Amino acid sequence: VNMDPEFESMFAPDEMRLLGLVSHNNMKHSMKQFVIANKNVLKKFRLTGTNTTMSMLKEVFGEDPEVVYGPKCKSGPLGGDAQLVAMAVTGQLGGCIFFIDPMDSHPHSADIECLVRQGNVHNILMMNNPTTAHICLNSLRVALKMGRMEMMPSFFFDLESPSVEAYKMRQNQVLESTKAKVPEPSSPLRSSVSRSARDFVTAPSSILKSTRREKNISQAMEKANRMSVQYKVSSFQAHAEVQKSPSGAAVGGKGEDKVEKGVPEKKKKKKFLKFIGGF
């Protein structure tokens, strides 16, 4: 009995998402036997996979013009599994035949786990051992022959695990909790402190230190006050001396000397006023 007869698919390879093939070193022989046994089904898909597995596919199919190849990934330890993860997340991968070696350790175990996990998250058809793969390909044969899109939905639609909805709800709750406003404090003292804090934020210039120019102006004003007081005192003393002198002594004599002594003080005032004008 021919277990892999020729048949006509209702869907062209370009109308469906990619089918990935990956196998670990100790599973390469099993993968090759699987491909030979199911090549008439496999060639109805666009095929992708890691480096060695893709080379093996081309060896089995040869120059068959009906086979459509998708992008070729790197070897698994060099990031090939991570490339398939990217395809799964971005909606390019519809299914993955992944023959995992359960008896050996792998340097890229994190990538392997990620590929399996993202396959489950996005509800992609994952076939992680030969028995599962053989049974699934028989179902795919029927779906392709009959044009039953609903039998292979991950090759046409974006799907996700039922648990994703619950995860999204939890994330929305976290987002809403961060948007919740903090209530205003009821205590008058705390309210005043809160208002002061708001004023501090809204008017930062009020707490800035004086600039150098402002300090210079302040010092000049202090100096001006001192000089103004000295000028008024000296002028008052000069005027008092003039009043005490005889009336005829206003021109010449002691009174004249006192008035003349006041002249330099006027010049000092003008010089000071000119100095202040520079600010």
Image: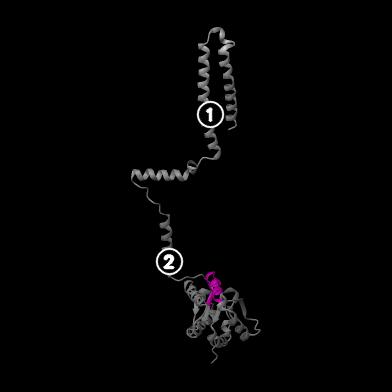
Left or right for 102, reference 13:
left
Label 2 packing within 10 angstroms: few (<14), some (14-19), many (20+): few
Q: Quadrant of the C terminus?
A: top right
Along the line of sight, which residue is nearer the eye, 9 or 45?
A: 45
- Residue lying farthest to the top in this orientation: 248
**Picture coordinates of residue 58, whole percent (x, y):** 62, 83
**Picture coordinates of residue 265, whole percent (x, y):** 57, 22
Question: How far separated are the C-alphas under marks 1 and 2?
Answer: 74 Å
Range of the magenta residues? 80-95
**Picture coordinates of residue 65, whole percent (x, y):** 65, 81
Q: Image point 51% across, 24% down: which residue? A: 230
Of circles 1 and 2, which is in front?
1
Q: Is residue 49 above or below residue 269?
A: below
Count the numbered circles shown.
Answer: 2
In terms of secondary structure, where does tag 1 sit?
helix
Along the line of sight, which residue is nearer the eye, 70 or 86?
A: 86
| Label annotation for residue 167 | 2
**Picture coordinates of residue 154, whole percent (x, y):** 51, 74
Q: Earlier in the sequence, mark 1 or mark 2?
A: 2
* Amino acid at the residue labelled 1: Ala
Predominant secondary structure in magenta? helix
Q: Report the residue marked by disc 1.
A: 224
Whether residue 89 appears in magenta in the rendering, the answer is: yes
Q: Is residue 109 above or below residue 208?
A: below
